[in-house]
Image: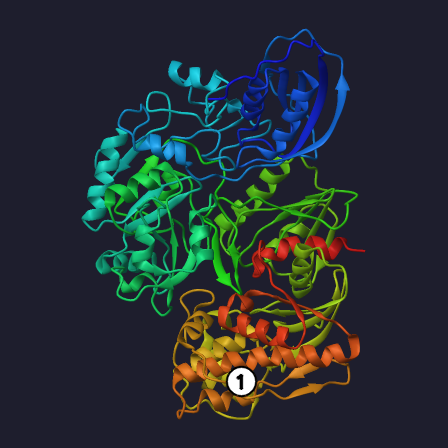
Amino acid sequence: MLKSIQSPPSGNIEARRLIVTGQVQGVGFRPFVCRLAHEFNLSGWVLNRTGTVEILIQGEPNFIDRFMTLLIDNAPPLARPTLARWKTAEPDDLDSFSILDSIAESSSAIHIPPDYFLCGDCLAELQDPKQRRYRYPFINCTQCGPRYTLIKKLPYDRVNTAMAEFELCADCRKEYENCLDRRFHAQPLACPVCGPSLTFNILREKPISDTQTALAACIEALRAGAIVAAKGVGGYHLICDAASETAVRRLRERKQRVRKPLAVLLPWRGEDGLAAVMEYAVLNQLELNLLQDPLRPIVLVEKRKGSPLADSVAPGINEIGIMLPYSPLHYLLTADFGGPLVATSANISGEPVMTAGDEVEQRLSSVADAFLHHNRPILRPADDAVFRSIAGKMRAIRLGRGCAPLEMPLPFTLQEPVLAVGGHMKNTVALAWGDRAVISPHIGDLGSRRSQEVFEQTIDDLASLYDIDVKKVIRDAHPDYRSSRWAEQSGLPVSQVFHHHAHASALAGEYGLSETMLVFTWDGTGYGEDGTIWGGEALLGRPGRWRRAGSLKSFRIPGSNAVGYEPWRSAAALFWECGREWQDCPLPSELLKKAWQYGLNTPLCSSAGRLFDAASAVLGLVSKADYDGQAPMELEALSADSGPGPRLPLIQEENGIWRSDWTPLLAMLQNEKLSKTERGGQFHASLAETIVLQAVQIRKRHRIDRVGLCGGVFQNKRLTELAIENLKREGFEVYLPERLPGNDAGISYGQIIEACSA
């Protein structure tokens, strides 16, 4: 507890009025201000305005100076305050410091906090039998607990959250109103007497509504091999024993998720919480640090050989996605169960995570054996964030709980607010106004009705929470994306951005780059300027002024919509393009070849992602994919360092575009004198060299020294690190997305940068 510093008897009293901006709501900032004022024996008040904090502070000038310094330097860990301005004021007749009622007003300075992990103080209290919140699954304070998923509107007061229906008991009220308590104005505050509770339900049986009994029943069911749908912070997880091959296989069969990797939730063990982690994975320091970070995402790490995890948790790859508990309920579940739990999103494949108990029971009754519900409403879904270590940094793969809404600066000031609606796969949306952009959590693929509903809800929520009246919509150039159709039906002015231009601009925007650079935008698919499918492009220029300077040899892909999940089609097409037959084609292809020959549903493609699909199929790894990216992921896992691969011929066309010919890869991939591991390694090496060869040729004329790598293909660690190593050897400065995912989840931010750059 802070002790107040007695003022010297000089009688020199001064007053100042301060405006503080930044992330100052939902992070315990006002209680901190109150305690800091008490420490220096200063009087005055603090209040929330929508998005900012206003402070009147009065007392000895030297104490006010110290107060203002510590206000920023010693702010709560979750706060990101900026002292926007201050001025002197007339001293008022005040003998104490207080928190005044918030004032709701329109403001461009609003910052919506994400959902936070369980802090150390609350964890210690959760585990202490002497505390009244011992083993309470909803314990929190000003430094932890849900935010984004329970805020209805700002100012961030309890009445404006999903906790409004839970009236504080006398003990909680005392904590809430005591400025020296760490729960002073903690809006999600609760205890077993007045807060949310758990219910355990097995269909057609009587529900268990006592929290501790429900928790015990859930653990008993998990130990018996059951699959449980458990409600968390931003949605439900499907959980089961990750060490039980039987339980994991049953989950896969019921969810029809044959091979897609499943995330694993590990217990917090040991002083640093990492004891269990070391049993199941091999990690570098970056990965260890992020696992312990308040963000608490899923981190993709190397599987430890011989670990007790079921083999079917992540078949075909050498990584697993692991996370440590981030909510009190997760701590209790993992501690009581005593081992690893599969914790995969409770959804229909590709859809956003489910948040409502009745919907979960209705739609997942054939998947889950039981349901662990709670009665704290989730106002909007937030799936778990995902990160991977690539080229010496942790890179975002998916935005979600803990890091979204993600705020990104703009390198310009907008005259009117705009909304970017992203792509079709891995969709996010972005809202921008002034010099700020806010990117939503992961929404998913927009091919289902629920995905579209959450897409529209997210747009409405962002506009409402940030109090922004959108004036213009930006969409992908592909006319048939669901996001594009929504934009055209919105009634607002619409502009369109080409898919790969948005990729390149997202990278430039993240690093604040406006000079001419070369960005390789490699992915699976995207609508190109010439109406063909792009995906292996090198774009030269800067936001608003990109032009195609490099590409891969085009080929026609048979059955455009099916090709992403049937890699064998891409492989067959490459052979046909070379006038050859793929003798080892695993499926009948005669009719497909006829359609290809007549040009029926066979769009022209220059996609690097399809080359990875084809290589995986030729090596006999994945002919039909269970999930997006399976073929490249299993190819990467198979591959090892095996020297350089065949050099791909590079020719400059009449239009100036440098184009690399992938044809030599086919003979190498079929060379049985090399192991599959060697062939996979050489495939990666050839494409990494291709990037460097194109960059060197383009530099000769345009004198660029900055190269960017963006697009889903560059989530491939092997390819990306090889390319970066070779580019740096040639003297290039290389940029790779970090805060933003390099896949289509970053498209929405890139659309804003591209469409609004001069």
Residue 294, compared with residue 536, is above or below; it is above
Q: Position of residue 41 (x, y in %)?
A: 59, 15
Image coords of residue 394 (percent x, y): 51, 57
Q: Residue at x 29, y 42 (%)?
A: 333
Location of residue 246 with respect to 583 vertically, above or below: above
Q: How packed is label 1: few (under 14 Cα within 10 Å), some, or many (20 or more)?
A: many
> For the point 70% across and 37% down, which residue is it?
469
Q: Secondary structure at mark 1?
A: helix
Q: Is residue 691 left or right of residue 116?
A: right
* Left or right: residue 686 compared with residue 235: right
What is the three-letter code of the residue carrying label 1? Leu
Place residue 24 in its image quadrant.
Answer: top right
Q: How many marks?
A: 1
For the residue pair 415 and 281, the one nearer the viewer reads as 281
Q: Is residue 455 left or right of residue 213?
A: right
Q: Is residue 306 above or below residue 589?
A: above
The residue that mark 1 highlights is 574
Q: Nearer the viewer, residue 130 or 673?
A: 130
Q: Is residue 105 above or below residue 269?
A: above
Q: Quadrant of the C terminus?
A: bottom right
User: Residue 471 in the image: x percent, y percent?
Assistant: 74, 43
Nearer-the-camera pick, 516 or 76: 76
